[in-house]
Image (cartoon, rainbow, N blue to C red):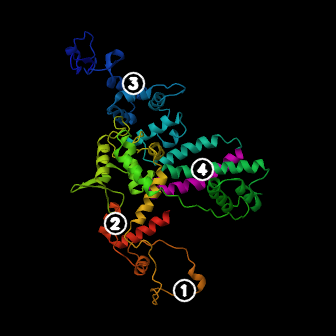
Amino acid sequence: MPGLRPGDQALVCVDCAGFTVSYRCSRCGHEGKLHGRHRCTRCAFADELADLLSDDTGRVRTELAPLAAHLLTMNAPLSGLCWLKHRKGRDRAPADLLAELGRGEIELTHEAFHVLQPWRAAAHLEELLMACDILPPADKQICAFERWLIQHLATITDPDQARLIKRFAIWDVQPRLRARAARRPLTAGSQRGFMNQIRQATRFRGWLAEHNLTLAGCGQADIDAWYIEHNAHARTNIRGFLHWCVANNLTRQFRLPTVVIGPATPMPAEQRIDLLGRVLTDPNWPLRSRVAAAIVLLYAQSVSRIVRLTIDDVTDVDGQVLLNLGEPPSPVPAAVAELLLTWIEQRTNMNTATNRDCRWLFPGRRAGQPMHPTTLSDLINALGVPSRLGRVGALHQHVLELPARSSPTLSATTTTRPPGPPPKSPRSTAVTPQVPGPGSRQAGHLLATVDYEPLPVRNPVMADMVRTHGPECGLWLAIRLVSRL
């Protein structure tokens, strides 16, 4: 509505406002902002897409018709029109990529999009094509890794070094990356870990060149010298490359020092409770950040797990809101439930063609994808809530509130040996500890030697799990949580 009504300043149409200039679209009659040839925003966007995606016949290319239809359904066509335009400091715009698609200069394959520039626009367009079923589905993190690998190899000036790093990436890193993606969706952190392995392998080759060494002549003393000069992060990421070199007879046999990972420091309980209270009561903080921070502080969930939640994971059973983080679903306290349901009604990134009908609890800006974990983690940290320390603090609190005795001790007075084969020798007793699953035989032996007391459970998550599965669930979860710290 372009006009304002005198008195209450309400929005009114052109006729009621008494304007002499028409703001109606010359094609559809919609009243609003007009563009060239007196067209509304949606009609101007439709004409722009038709021009870009048309082939030699002047019609939209048949294979790209679903893309044009998908883009035209967005609730905010002005965002789409702005997305097509050139941006300051960039030689190419998304409109250039769409025009090349329409002319058939870009193949409809993932490999073709991995070499396009600007890469952000190319990645966004690739995901839109997957959402329209024009391109076959592929893991977003694998696509990002392959796109990054092409750019990284282009920065290596030594041809021999570039061939070795490419060989390592194709024959070792990528198979491990795809194997992990086949088991569960990849996170940005795991993809970044594989990228760091290739970066560190490149730096290691540079270090060898600076010291006039070759990979074939690298020995144990050289490896020890490199370990002394570099930090724990570099030592961890180089192990995959060195193991691969030894397995493929590219270097001598050597022994790598053991990686020691110290336990994470938990957030004090008082600080966690204070932060949770501020998250639930401060209306000046962004709603999205408050909901994510509450899930971290209450349920000890990682940010990469939180972004994979959907609105279908939030259910209401007889007035009790549940959050599906596993089996059984976890009860949500009333204050958090109100915050959570309000956010579901006001989710952002829902007005463009990217995630118009998505079910993600935290929608992202890419088609069919949730919010990036790093972006959500930064939003949580901006509230003064350290996501990693808050999660570790919540894990410790869950362990402390389990129904087992606060310091369970194995019965030392029993004279009956637990069932099972006797040890062959005193040395055979030093085995690697394994975490038993619920209901397993090992868990049964462990439960038989632990004295339980029905302690009150204050945490609603723990209380619901114990009420549903009994105290055995508490002991098993305690073992699982402690093993992950």
Asked where in the image residue 152 lies, by quadrant, the reply is top right
User: Residue placed at 63% from the left, 43% from the top?
Assistant: 153
Q: Amino acid at mark 2?
A: Val
Few, some or many residues within 10 Å of mark 1 (<14, 14–19, 20+): few
Is residue 184 on the magenta stretch?
A: yes
Q: Amino acid at mark 4?
A: Asn
**Residue matched to label 2:** 457
Side (left or right) of 231 relative to 306: right
**Residue matched to label 4:** 196
Disc 1 vs disc 2: which is toward the camera?
2
Is residue 12 on the magenta stretch?
A: no
Q: Which residues are magenta?
A: 159-186
Decide whether the magenta segment is chiefly helix, strand or loop. helix
Which secondary structure, mark 2? loop
Task: Compare residues 413 and 262 and report the one nearer the observer.
Answer: 413
Closer to the chain start, of discs 1 and 3, is 3
Quadrant in which the N terminus is drawn: top left
Closer to the chain start, of discs 3 and 4, is 3
Q: Residue furthest top?
A: 20
User: Residue placed at 32% from the left, 50% from the top?
Assistant: 336
Asked where in the image residue 226 lies, by quadrant, the reply is bottom right
Which secondary structure, mark 3? helix
Residue 172 drawn at (x, y percent): 59, 56
Disc 3 vs disc 4: which is toward the camera?
4
Closer to the chain start, of discs 4 and 1, is 4
Residue 71 drawn at (x, y percent): 36, 33
**Residue matched to label 3:** 48
Checking the image for residue 423, the label placed there is: 1
Side (left or right) of 251 relative to 478: right
The answer to whether residue 158 is above or below residue 12 is below
